[in-house]
Amino acid sequence: MNKDKWYQQHERGAGNFRLNILFWVYKIFGIRFTKFWVRLVARIIGAGAKSAKQFSGEYRQILNEYQIANNIKPTVFSPAQHISFFADSLVDKMIAMCSGKNRIKFNIQNDTDWQEFQELINQKHGVFLVCSHVGNIEALAAFPDNANIKIHAFQQISQTGIFHEFISRHSVRKNTKIHAIEDMNVGTATEMFDCLSNGDLVMMAGDRISALNPEKTINAKILGNDCKLPIGVFKFAKAMSHPIFAVALLNTGPETYTLIVKKLDAQNVNNMATEFAKFLEQNILRAPIQWFNFYNFFNK
C-alpha cells in the first residue's frame, strides 16, 4: 500500500554505520567520489521505492501540465533522476553541517527583499523564516555570514531520526540548533520569541501539513492545483511579532547554491499563506527537479 502522507514515510538506506562510512569516504576520497557512490546506492534503493517513484511521476505530470498551459517548456526527468538529485543534496547537507572545510559556495538573489533582510540581520533584529522542501535549505548552516547568527530550525525528528542523530554528533555548526516538532509545547512560543528578540533566526517548513494535527490546514493553489498548507506554521510565525520571510536555497551548480528571500505579509495569515504558495511555485519552476516531496502533496 502506498504511503501517501509524508509522515507515513521513513528513512530508506540510512543507518549510523552507513552514514559514518559515507563521511569517511568523503574525508578520504573527496566529494566527487562520494557523490558517485551515493548516486549508485540511491539508484539501487530507489528501484524498490514504489511510492517515491509513483509520486515523483505524478508530480512531474502536474508540473508539465502547468508548464504547457503557461507556454513554458516542459521539464523532463525520470523518478530515478529525481531520487538521485535528492541523494546529491543529502551529501551537500552532510558537508555543510559536518565538514570544517566549507565546500559549499553561495550566491545571493540581490533584490529589495534581500536588502531589507540583510539590514535586519545587521541590526541584530530577529527574523522568522518559512522554508520549503525545494532546494536544500539545510545547507544554509554553512553560509559564511552565519558565524555570529543563531538559527533555530524545527524538524520532525521521528521521520529523520538516524540522519539527525548523525548530524548532531558530527556537526561543526554550533550556531544551528535543531528543535523537535514533537517536543513543542506552550513554552515553545515564549522561548522562540526570546530568541528572536536576541536577534536569532527561527525557521519552520511551510509546505508540509502537521503530522500531529493533519486536519489543521489552510487552502492554497500551486501549479494550478489545490493543496493544503500547515496553518499552524503561519499562525505561529504571526504570533512571534517579528518580520517574516520566505526563504529558499536552490542548487545552481556543483556544491553551489543561490539564496532567495521574500518578505511575507505578517498581518494576515491567509495572505501570508498565499504569498508563500506563490513563492514556492516560483522556486519549483526555477528548479523543478529540486522539489523533494515524494508523497501525495496534491491529494490526487
Image (cartoon, grey):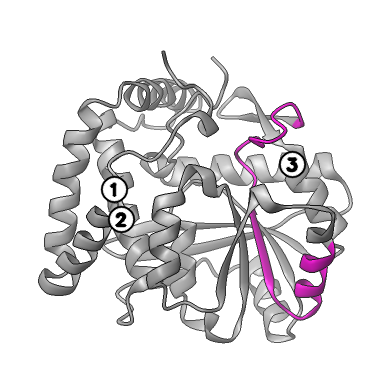
Q: Is residue 196 magenta?
A: yes
Q: Amino acid at mark 1?
A: Ala
Left/right of residue 288 with respect to residue 246 in the rendered view: left
Q: From the image, which quarter does the N terminus lie in?
A: top left
Snapshot quadrant of residue 204: bottom right
- Which of the two marks, 2 or 3, is nearer to us in this view? 2
Tell me the magenta residue range: 190-217
Element at badge 3? helix
Decide which of 175, 162 is in the foreground and name it.
162
Question: Could you tell me which residue is drawn at 58 percent across and 43 percent down?
Answer: 280
The numbered disc on residue 16 is 2
The numbered disc on residue 87 is 1
Task: Where is residue 44? Give x, y as percent.
Answer: 16, 35
Nearest to N terminus: mark 2 or mark 3:
2
- Which of the two marks, 3 or 1, is nearer to us in this view? 1
The reply to whether residue 265 is visible in this rendering is no
Q: Is residue 124 above or below residue 246?
A: below
Q: Amino acid at mark 2?
A: Asn
Q: Is residue 12 above or below residue 181?
A: above
Left/right of residue 168 with respect to residue 260 in the rendered view: left
- The residue most toward the front is 17
Residues at marks 3 and 1, CA–CA distance in whole angstroms: 29 Å
Q: Is residue 295 magenta?
A: no
Left/right of residue 278 with respect to residue 268 in the rendered view: left
Q: Label 3: which residue?
A: 273
